[in-house]
Image: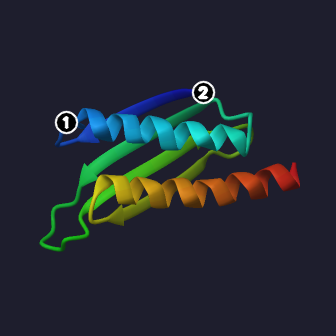
Amino acid sequence: MKITVQSIGLTPHEPLESHIEKKVSKLETFYDKIHECKIFLKVENNSDRLNKTAELILAVPGDDIVVKKTAVSFEESLDLCVDTAKKLLIKKKETA
């Protein structure tokens, strides 16, 4: 699976990149037909503390899986995305 990270308005530091790699690579254990994973990181322009958004797009046969979550940190928002994507992949595997 190819993992692409795009960040809008920021540069991801090494611990964040390794966190992304570790979390996203685990998704293949739930569904082995993932072609590509695109991750978009963005800081929302608001005064709220919940302003770090991660969007996860999984290219799988059929419809792509898209999950978008916002949290206090990118790690937390990515964890929420991966948890939701995991549930969707398990559901997709059961219906396939």
- Name the residue carrying label 2: 1
Q: Nearer the viewer, residue 49 or 42?
A: 49
Q: SS class of the residue under badge 1?
A: loop
Image position of 87 with respect to 47: above or below: above
> Residue 52, percent across and down?
27, 58
- Residue at image position (27%, 32%) is 14
Toward which corner of the image does residue 87 lie, by quadrant? bottom right
**Which numbered tag is attached to residue 11?**
1
Image position of 67 with respect to 12: above or below: below
Marks 1 and 2 sit apart, C-alpha to C-alpha, by 23 Å
The type of residue carrying mark 2 is Met
Q: Is residue 62 left or right of residue 6?
A: right
Q: Nearer the viewer, residue 66 or 54?
A: 54
The type of residue carrying mark 1 is Thr
Q: Nearer the viewer, residue 89 or 19?
A: 19
Q: Is residue 69 left or right of residue 64?
A: left
- Residue at image position (86%, 55%) is 95
